[in-house]
Amino acid sequence: MCRHLPSARLVAYLHDSPRIIASASKLTLSPKDFTSISEGMSGERAEEWVRELVKRGHGSPLEHSLFVFEVVCSRACSHQLVRHRHASFSQLSQRYSDKYLRGMIKKACELTGIPYAEDYGAFLRVLGSLSASSPGFHDLLDVVAEAFIVPPRVVEAEDKGFLEALLRGVESYYRAVASGISFEDARYLLPQAVKTRLLVSMNARELLEVFIPLRTCSRAQWEVRNVAWQMLMELRRVAPELFKYAGPRCVLQDARVRAAPCTLDEYLSGSCTPTVERCPELVPRDRIAECIRNALRGAGCGHGDLEPGS
């Protein structure tokens, strides 16, 4: 369990989205009403309509859908998520909750053997004792991961100084709160790595045409890329007809210029070769599949958990 990494899980979605989207698409051409179209729309036909939507870039029917995720990530990452305008967000407030920080204090109590007490002075004593005991990197990571997202490169390098800097931020925060400074002012002392929780709602158009292409790309920042790949794997599980074509921008770009769109699995397996000379990030055609694999490789706690086709 990699608690120092972000997580994303699908918590709700509009069931039968592929059929609804396919029926909405056919409605633009048919004299029949939606109910008649929908009742006559088989799974196979729905998949054909979706494939045509992806190929032609006819995105408006994709908006007749909704997918809701719970995301736990850093504040640095959440700032990137909320830039997506065609989405809805509800986020844990730092003005009213120090949930993750208290979780870290409880974990520090376990390591130091000090009983947990609901008192800011006690929190500071626990943090002082933790620093004085000079725990090893992995013991310290186990504590810090309760409240912070830690970059994989920091973990690979076992950079204890990085973790200690995060702890100093928490100590400064609780020292300020203990002195009477409000939560909303004390939070200015916290590092951007501090965890937050969001509920994120998007429709299939935002996911297929904007969020997933941009954020699963190997050029995306590592944490938001991690979140995006987790979201994509969740989507493929519940609506494969829609999201088997989803992937980085090179996948979307290639789908628009070929006779029939390829799935992400087909690109990764090599059974489908990109037709575009270069992707939007200027990666040449013969390196696109490997670039996608590299993006996926850095996207999980053991990227096999996120492997397409699994």
Image: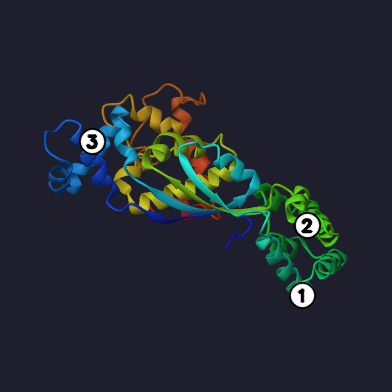
Name the element at disc 1: loop
Please provide percent x and percent y for residue 52.
25, 33
Identified by mark 2, the residue type is Val
Among the two numbered marks 3 and 2 on one chain, the one whose residue lies closer to the N terminus: 3
Q: Quadrant of residue 167?
A: bottom right
Figure label count: 3
Image disc number at residue 117: 1
Identified by mark 1, the residue type is Ala
Please provide percent x and percent y for residue 3.
61, 60
Name the element at disc 2: helix
Identified by mark 3, the residue type is Ser
Give me the residue at 39% from left, 38% from top.
208
**Would you name the residue on which mark 2 appears?**
170
Whole-angstrom CA distance, mark 3 to mark 2, is: 52 Å
**Would you name the residue on which mark 3 appears?**
25
Give me the residue at 60% from left, 51% from top.
73
Among the two numbered marks 3 and 1 on one chain, the one whose residue lies closer to the N terminus: 3
> Nearer the viewer's eye, disc 1 or disc 2?
1
Give me the residue at 78% from left, 52% from top.
186
**Which quadrant of the figure contains the N terminus?**
bottom right
